[in-house]
C-alpha cells in the first residue's frame, strides 16, 4: 500500500468516528420527546416477602489484639425465700438474783412449760442468750428475738 492510500483510509475512519459522535450529541440535544406507550390492564402483584432468619453471635472468646476476655455479664442473684420459723409461745415471767455471785436465773415459759434458765442454757430448742430485769433475748433455730417481762409495770 502506498503512503497516500493509508492516509486516505485513516482519514475516512476518523471522519466516520467523528460523525457517529456528532450524531449522538445532536440526538441528545434535540427537543423531540418520545411519547411513552401506555399500558392498559396492568396486573400488579407484589412479591411475597419472606421472613428474615435472624441470629445472634455469642462472642465469648479472647480478644486477639488485647489478649483479654470480654466482660462477663453479672449473674442475677437468686432470691432464696427463707422459711418462716414458727416461734413457740415464749413468756418471760421474772428472775432471781444471787446476792453473793451475781448470777441470774430467769423464769421462762415455753409452750406452757416453765423452765429455770441461765445465760447459754437451752430448753426445747430455745437458747437464752442474754437477759436483764426487764427483757430477755432468746435464740430459736438461728433467729434472735427479744421478749419483754410479762406483767411489767411501767
Image (cartoon, rainbow, N blue to C red):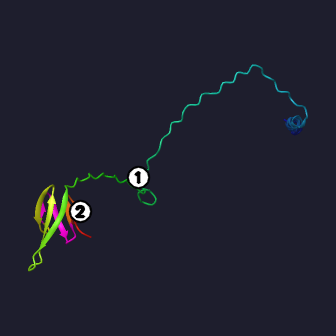
Q: Nearer the viewer, residue 1 or 154?
A: 154
Where does label 2 land, which residue?
144
Q: Earlier in the sequence, mark 1 or mark 2?
A: 1
Q: Which residue is mark 1?
A: 61
Q: Quadrant of residue 16?
A: top right
Above or below 95: residue 46: above
Q: Is residue 128 magenta?
A: yes
Instruction: Look at the numbered disc 1 and give the secondary structure of its residue.
Output: loop
Which residue is more in the foreground, 92 or 28?
Answer: 92
Q: Residue at horizontal 41%, vertical 59%?
A: 68
Magenta span of residues: 121-136
Instruction: Based on the picture, tell me whether residue 20 belongs to the magenta stretch.
Output: no
List x then y, in percent, for residue 38.
80, 23
The residue positioned farthest toward the left in the image shown? 100
Dividing the picture into quadrants, the one containing residue 37 is: top right
- Which residue corresponds to the image point at 44% horizontal and 56% vertical from the top-left? 64
Amino acid at each position: 500500500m502506498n503512503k497516500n492510500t493509508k492516509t486516505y483510509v485513516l482519514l475516512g475512519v476518523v471522519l466516520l468516528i467523528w460523525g457517529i459522535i456528532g450524531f449522538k450529541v445532536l440526538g441528545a440535544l434535540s427537543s423531540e420527546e418520545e411519547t411513552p406507550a401506555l399500558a392498559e390492564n396492568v396486573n400488579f402483584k407484589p412479591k411475597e416477602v419472606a421472613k428474615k432468619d435472624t441470629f445472634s453471635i455469642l462472642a465469648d472468646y479472647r480478644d486477639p489484639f488485647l489478649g483479654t476476655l470480654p466482660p462477663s455479664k453479672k449473674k442475677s442473684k437468686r432470691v432464696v425465700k427463707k422459711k418462716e420459723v414458727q416461734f413457740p409461745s415464749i413468756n418471760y415471767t421474772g428472775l432471781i438474783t444471787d446476792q453473793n455471785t451475781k448470777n441470774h436465773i430467769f423464769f421462762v415459759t415455753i409452750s406452757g412449760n416453765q423452765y429455770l434458765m441461765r445465760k447459754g442454757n437451752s430448753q426445747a430448742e430455745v437458747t437464752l442468750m442474754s437477759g436483764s430485769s426487764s427483757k430477755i433475748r432468746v435464740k430459736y433455730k438461728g433467729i434472735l428475738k427479744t421478749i419483754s417481762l410479762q406483767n411489767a409495770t411501767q
